[in-house]
Image: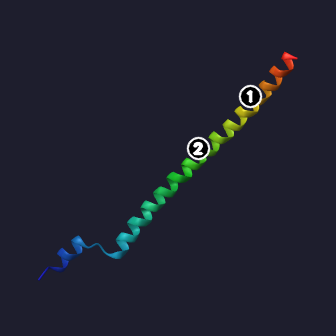
Amino acid sequence: MPNKSTVQLFRPDTEKVLVKGLNAMTKACDALSTQNDLLNKDIEKLRMKVERLQERVLINQDEKE
């Protein structure tokens, strides 16, 4: 008959499993939030670049006329 401590060694209790899962989900959420912030900054930089390029196109068109 297996010893109770041996059984617990290989079968962690529900609370430990849930705590580990919650910690993993928290880390994943933090990583996604950081990535989202970086992507939003990249989007803003690209919008500004598009505006500058559109202005340059308009200036070049005026110079050709």
> Quarter holding the C terminus?
top right
Quadrant location of residue 48? top right
What numbered label is drawn on residue 4? none
Residue at image position (55%, 47%) is: 35
Q: Position of residue 46 (x, y in %)?
A: 67, 36
Q: Is mark 2 on a helix, strand or loop?
A: helix
Question: Could you say which is closer to the camera, residue 26 or residue 53?
Answer: 53
Quarter assignment of residue 61: top right
Q: Position of 11 compared to 2: left or right?
A: right
Query: What is the count of numbered marks?
Result: 2
Residue 45 percent across, percent down from the top left: 67, 36
The kind of residue tagged 1 is: Leu
Relative image position of residue 44 (x, y in whole percent): 68, 40
Position of residue 19 relative to residue 36, above or below, is below
Q: Which residue is drawn at 72% across and 33% down?
A: 50
The residue most toward the left is 1
Residue nearest the observer in this picture, 3 or 35? 35
Q: Residue at x 40, y 71 (%)?
A: 18
Task: Give residue 38's mark.
Answer: 2
Structural crowding at the residue carrying mark 1, measured as other residues with C-alpha within 10 Å and reported as few (<14), some (14–19) or many (≥20): few
Residue 33: image location, x then y, percent = 56, 53
* Front-lying residue, 54 or 17: 54
- Inspect the image, locate mark 2, and give the three-letter code of the amino acid beneath it: Leu
Closer to us: mark 1 or mark 2?
1
Question: Which circle's residue, 1 or 2, is located before the other in the chain?
Answer: 2
- Circle 1 residue: 53
Q: How crowded is mark 2: few (under 14 residues within 10 Å), some or many (20 or more)?
A: few
